[in-house]
Image (cartoon, grey):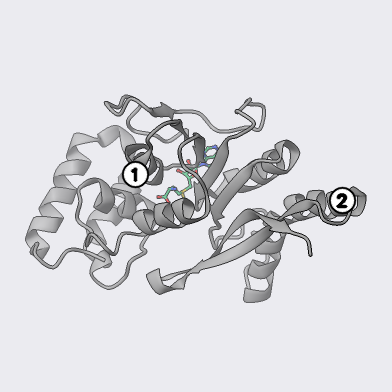
Amino acid sequence: MLRTDLSDEVIISRIKEFLEQHPEGYDEDTKEFIERCALWGRNTSTTVSELDQIYNYLELDQEDNNIYRVFADLVESKFDINRPIYEIGGGNIPTVGKILALRQQKGTVTIYDPRLIFTKTDIPNLRLVKKPFTGEEIVESNALMIGYKPCDATMPMMKYIAKNDLDFMIALCDCAHGFLEIMDEDDINLWYQSCEWPVYIKYAEEERVKKSGQEIRRVKRLSMEKYDNPSPIIYNILDVKE
Ligand SMILES: C[S@@+](CC[C@H](N)C(=O)[O-])C[C@H]1O[C@@H](n2cnc3c(N)ncnc32)[C@H](O)[C@@H]1O
């Protein structure tokens, strides 16, 4: 949700100036769309990723109503962030990963996205990798993997997480990638479940072989509906068996 101390004219002109400074980041259609919808954030906390990222970068959001900050808070509320963190599908402009890097006392944040506009940063513990995450990469075994609406990166992430038993938190997107032909509400739920599936299978199998009393990690859900994001946030956590 946009700041109320800035006029519409100021917001529009800052966004236009940003787009002029970064012509490489946006094609003509996207640029035209962003300019036309520059004030969308007056009515909602969540617009489209490209615009939300610019709001965040230019500090146009109300401090307590910034979706990336809310997601970073959720990550921090469930996991120790002083460790290697990988954000996949970070966007054109670093958002969540940068917020977490600034909060870390130790550890690093590595952001993967082929669309990154910036690859240099003066934050020493932040690494910006302008490449897609393929699942062939090697990350530390104590790493935390996160994604805010990582779209096409969601399934490679989930498979990697399951294979390597990583901690994770992902805010799923509602565009049902992989299920393009079936977009009604029930099928959106199918998409959500299919994202959870690789991890669920892994833990269900582990459950069968583990002795009673051992720790099992399960996929849990959180909500950001309060911030106009209807899609679930999924994460894993240690459950102690009774
Ligand atoms: C909906 S956008 C979300 C961006 C950002 N997290 C946000 O919420 O503003 C999805 C992003 O995922 C990126 N992406 C898609 N596949 C990817 C992959 N295999 N590895 C890394 N990033 C990927 C796209 O380039 C795009 O920037």
Q: Residue at x 67, y 42 (%)?
A: 161
Instruction: Please tell me the numbered disc located at residue 99.
Output: 1
Q: Residue at x 18, y 50 (%)?
A: 15
| Image side of residue 186 versus residue 147, left or right | right
Q: Secondary structure at mark 1?
A: helix
Residue placed most toward the observer, 53 or 80? 80
Instruction: Please tell me the numbered disc located at residue 15.
Output: none
Q: Quadrant of the N terminus?
A: bottom left
Badge 2 density bin: few <14, some 14–19, many ≥20, Cα 10 Å: few
* x, y percent for residue 38: 23, 59
- Number of marks present in the image shown: 2
Labels 1 and 2: the sequence-earlier one: 1
* x, y percent for residue 220: 64, 62
Residue placed most toward the observer, 189 or 61? 61
On the question of residue 179 being in view, the answer is no
Q: Quadrant of the C terminus?
A: bottom right
Q: Which residue is mark 2?
A: 205
Residue type at mark 1 is Ile
